Image (cartoon, rainbow, N blue to C red):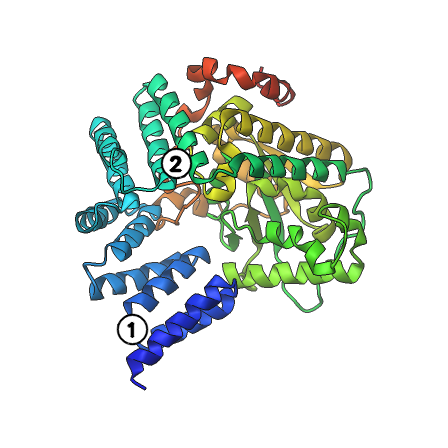
Amino acid sequence: MPASIERSELVQRADRLMATGDHAEAVRVYEQAVTESRDDVRALHRLAIIYIRLQRQTEAASLLMRAAELEPSNAQVLEDLAVLLDSFGRHAESVELAEHAHALDSTCARAVSLIAKNLGRRGRSADAVSLLEQVLAGEAIESRIKADLTWQLARLHAESGDHRQCIESIQKAQRLLVAALPNAPGRANEFVDLVDRCADALTPGAHAHGAKASPGTHVPKHLFLLGFPRSGTTLAESLLVSQPGVTATEEDQYLHHMLTGIPERLGAQRTYPECLELLSAEDLSALRDEYWRAQRYYFEIDSATVLHVDKSPLNLIHLGAIRRLFPDAAVVVAIRDPRDVVLSCQMQSFHDGQAVLHHSLQSSARVYAATMRLWRRCRACLDLAWCELRYESLIEDPESRVREILSMLDLGMDLQAFRRRDSRPARAIRTPSADAARAETHPRAVGRWRYYEDYLKPVMTELDPFVSAFGYE
């Protein structure tokens, strides 16, 4: 059998493994195909996409660059490479690739998004708006992608001070999202129900007996960086990883899927989180070991790692389970003015799992209220090593806030490494997008809600208790 056919069969086998969820084996088979031939563009491209999911972005970039060299007219490869380089802050290279991809295929929506971003960065917001409006007028782009481009249009209007147009674009994006994901309202209701059940399961002394680490394995200090989306967790994570020996997850969903899958794993009749009380000490230790195996695989934790930061904001709802599985972990909860949080969520295009929670202003506010009610209950009844990290204070004095977090963990601060962070090679930021995450470091993100006070009025009944509770009157 010709070698090219054998490689093709390997790639097809890896595709099937990906489809069935066996990602580890899929990676192995894709790597085998790439090893046997560095000229197989399809294998290079597929493996690069998996590496991106595994947060192995440097390796992914190398594979995509090789694929682009081999097939410079492959618009999808160029677009994926452009998006990845943009997440590293390599904007000039990214835009050049995006423009090439768009010239090859005018339906490459992410390429259009990058071109529009670049126009905005260069002060040409009107041209960016015009480009997006032109693309959105076309019929070839599906509703879900149109929703993301319309949210980008909303942010451009916000930056230019056209708040009315911003609101109109937000509402149009949300209509497009619901058209693409008609089950969004139902999924948001299911999430709120899960949050409420997690809150009900929190009682003083609940989950008091924690899992123990397996002997002979290196487990670094462990920090859960939690909160509501758009509260500053990405900024905090980017500052913490400036320190030597610190690894971070960048919103990995492994823990959420592991926990919500416990009933099926146990064959239990009770749902999560009620099933937690059925777990034996052996069950807890097995889950803990499974978690750490996955973290080591995905995030290259080794003996030099002194701190592992698990940053997935909405894992806040799992604090009861976290306390039981990881009794030695510390928790930092990001707090921000609730009005700025909900407004910022309205302006962002999230991945589908989070986008459904923000399909309307009312949904965002309802999910926020349920989540933060749970946090306030956690503060009162769980014996956790925790602190709150106020977003506005982090913006004002990031060095002091990072020092306080490290001190809570009995870790010193490498001040030189912290101050060198801006000169280091850019770390990929993909949540919710590189530009949005970096823009949050600007003081203009504080108090933005005042420009949208009338827009927020319908949900202030939900938000007012937290404005007061967190000291934002």
Secondary structure at badge 2 equals helix
Viewer-nearest residue: 462 or 241? 462
- Residue 25, compared with residue 141, is above or below; it is below
User: Who's the residue at 44% across and 48% down the image?
Assistant: 417
Residue 218 is left or right of residue 123, and the answer is right
Residue type highlighted by circle 2: Ala
Residue 281 placement (x, y as % from top left): 79, 59
Query: Percent x, y for residue 22?
Result: 52, 66
- Tell me if residue 442 can be seen: yes
At 63% across and 64% down in the image, what residue appears?
218
Q: Is residue 231 visible?
A: no
* Residue 7 versus residue 154 in the image, above or below: below
Q: In this view of the protein, which residue sits in the foreground, 36 or 391?
A: 36
Can you identify the residue that label 1 sits on? Answer: 38
Q: Are marks 1 and 2 in contact (CB under 8 Å)?
A: no
Q: Which residue is mark 2?
A: 436
Q: Position of residue 397 (x, y in %)?
A: 49, 31
Front residue of 180/220: it is 180
